[in-house]
Image (cartoon, grey):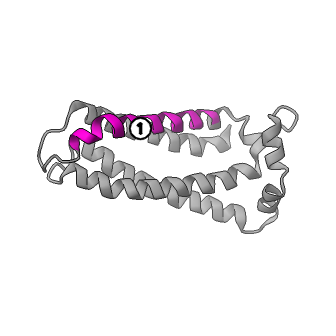
């Protein structure tokens, strides 16, 4: 795979950092478990926010739900990025050539765009709404898109090993 992968990924895989990950008894398994734990935390936080945006948990003010869950989601996403980089570095030249991994990266970008649009356009309109107030249709749309995109990211993450 080294001959067809872009040079930057070959260099990453051949770095001392990546070699250390592969040679360590613990580095890769700890990063793998960390990635799964971060995924569970991220999925939980995203699910709470998105389900609220789709109309569930209406007895809770949407701004309050978003504030708490957003902090957890950002921390978990940082854990996903760090642990994912460790996992990626160990096999960079192989993984970067995997079509499912590339789809996963595209979906992550789409998910982040959905978050940015929601935060800039929709969130300011719902931050101060009281409990049981109807949400704009854009909130429901963003929530459904988010749930769908992040579920697809997780599915792709599991499927990488099989392609």
Q: Position of residue 76 (x, y in %)?
A: 48, 57
User: Image quarter for residue 161?
Assistant: top right
From this view, report whether residue 14 is shown above or below residue 110.
Answer: below
Q: Indicate the position of residue 52 as horizontal and vertical percent values.
A: 25, 46
Quadrant in the picture for residue 8: top right
Q: Give the overall secondary structure of the magenta segment.
A: helix
Q: Nearer the viewer, residue 149 or 122?
A: 122
Question: Is residue 74 among the parts visible in the rendering?
Answer: yes
Q: Is residue 132 left or right of residue 141?
A: left
The spot of residue 151 in percent (x, y) is 45, 42
* Residue at mark 1: 116
Q: Which range is magenta?
A: 102-126
- Residue at the outermost bottom position: 25
| Position of residue 67 in the picture relative to residue 57 (left or right) | right
Specify the farthest residue to the right. 3
| Picture residue at 57% right of the left edge, 37% below the top | 104
Q: Is residue 1 left or right of residue 59?
A: right
Query: Which residue is drawn at the image coordinates 76% and 68% (left, top)?
Result: 25
Give above or below for 14 relative to 97: below
| Residue found at x 18% / y 48% | 128
- Residue 40 can be seen, yes or no: no
Q: Is residue 123 magenta?
A: yes
On whether residue 112 falls in the magenta region, the answer is yes
């Amino acid at each position: 795979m080294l001959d067809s992968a872009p040079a930057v990924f070959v260099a990453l895989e051949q770095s001392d950092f990546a070699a250390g990950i592969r040679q360590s008894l613990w580095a890769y398994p700890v990063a793998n478990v960390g990635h799964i734990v971060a995924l569970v935390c991220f999925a939980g936080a995203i699910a709470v926010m998105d389900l609220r945006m789709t109309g569930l948990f209406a007895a809770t003010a949407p701004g309050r739900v978003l504030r708490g869950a957003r902090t957890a989601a950002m921390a978990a996403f940082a854990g996903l990025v760090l642990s994912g980089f460790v996992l990626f570095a160990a096999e960079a030249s192989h993984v970067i050539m995997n079509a499912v991994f590339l789809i996963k990266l595209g979906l992550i970008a789409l998910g982040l765009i959905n978050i940015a649009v929601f935060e800039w356009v929709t969130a300011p309109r719902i931050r101060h709404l009281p409990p049981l107030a109807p949400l704009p249709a854009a909130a429901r749309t963003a929530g459904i898109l988010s749930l769908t995109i992040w579920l697809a990211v997780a599915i792709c993450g599991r499927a990488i090993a099989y392609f």
